[in-house]
Image (cartoon, grey):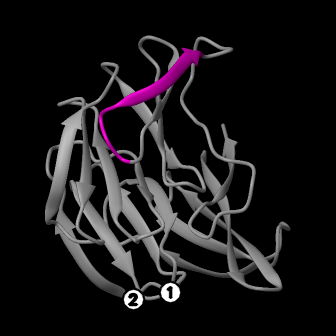
Amino acid sequence: MGVISSSTVSASTENLISCDINNNKVYIHTWITITITSSFSWPGAAISWLAMDSSNNLVGSDVASNKIFLFTWITSTVSSSFASVDDNPYWVTIDSWDDLISSDTDTDKIYIHSWITSSISSSFAAPGWFTTWLTVDSSDNLISSDVADNKIYIHTWTSSTISSSFASPSTSNYWLTIESYHKNHLYLLILF
């Protein structure tokens, strides 16, 4: 079981990045194929989520060690790491300014970081009580989903203001992403 994502790493290449939460490994695929170009061990205890910044540096959260890791490119080299604000840093995404956005399921809060650091520029209560996913659209509007109330929320920018919301088409609304290309978005496939 793991999360697979592809990130544009150059103008002509898209490589799939996948993680295995059982073996704590990150895999770099050749394009979007089963072929593995390289892999490395995860530095923490339990991979929660992966994202990419605009320079194609991998960012990941670890729910067991309550840490967020910033890697040098898509390698095992950790350029920095820091403790999450609260105990459960499950979901992370990055806006077009390379500000990390994280959520915590225990406190039901969303945190806007100053760049990819532990410094918090703002935070607000999540609109639901079990936020399970974060992403941003091409206009840097935060989109969050809540599995407890089965709703998807569109925020005004990265703020607590909700411009619209709608019911999820399913009762297990855990994952979402944006189809259109955005430099910081990952195209995601979920493996069960």
Quadrant for the N terminus in the image: top right
Q: Main secondary structure of the magenta part?
A: strand
As displayed, is residue 4 above or below residue 36?
Answer: above
Bin the neighbour count of mark 1 within 10 Å (Cα to Cα): few under 14, some 14-19, many 20 and up. Answer: some
Residue 48 visible to an observer of this rendering: yes
Residue 62 visible to an observer of this rendering: no
Q: Which mark is residue 119?
A: none
The location of residue 58, given as percent across then percent down, is 48, 74
Bin the neighbour count of mark 2 within 10 Å (Cα to Cα): few under 14, some 14-19, many 20 and up. Answer: few
Q: Which residue is the site of mark 2?
A: 77
CA–CA distance between discs 2 and 1? Answer: 8 Å
Q: Within the image, what quadrant is residue 175 found in?
A: top right
Quadrant for the C terminus in the image: top right
Q: Secondary structure at mark 2?
A: loop
Residue visible at 50% across and 51% down in the picture:
22
Q: Closest to the observer: 134 or 165?
A: 165
**Which segment is the magenta one?**
158-167
The location of residue 147, given as percent across then percent down, is 46, 20
What residue type is disc 1 on?
A: Trp
Left or right: 105 in relation to 140: left
As displayed, is residue 50 above or below residue 115?
Answer: above
Residue visible at 15% across and 59% down in the picture:
120
Left or right: 151 in relation to 33: left
Residue 126 on the magenta span: no
- Whether tag 2 and tag 1 are in contact, CB under 8 A, the answer is yes
Q: Which residue is the site of mark 1?
A: 73
The location of residue 172, given as percent across then percent down, is 57, 18
Residue visible at 14% across and 66% down in the picture:
119
As displayed, is residue 166 above or below residue 62?
Answer: above
Q: Closest to the observer: 39 or 8?
A: 8
The location of residue 13, given as percent across then percent down, is 80, 82
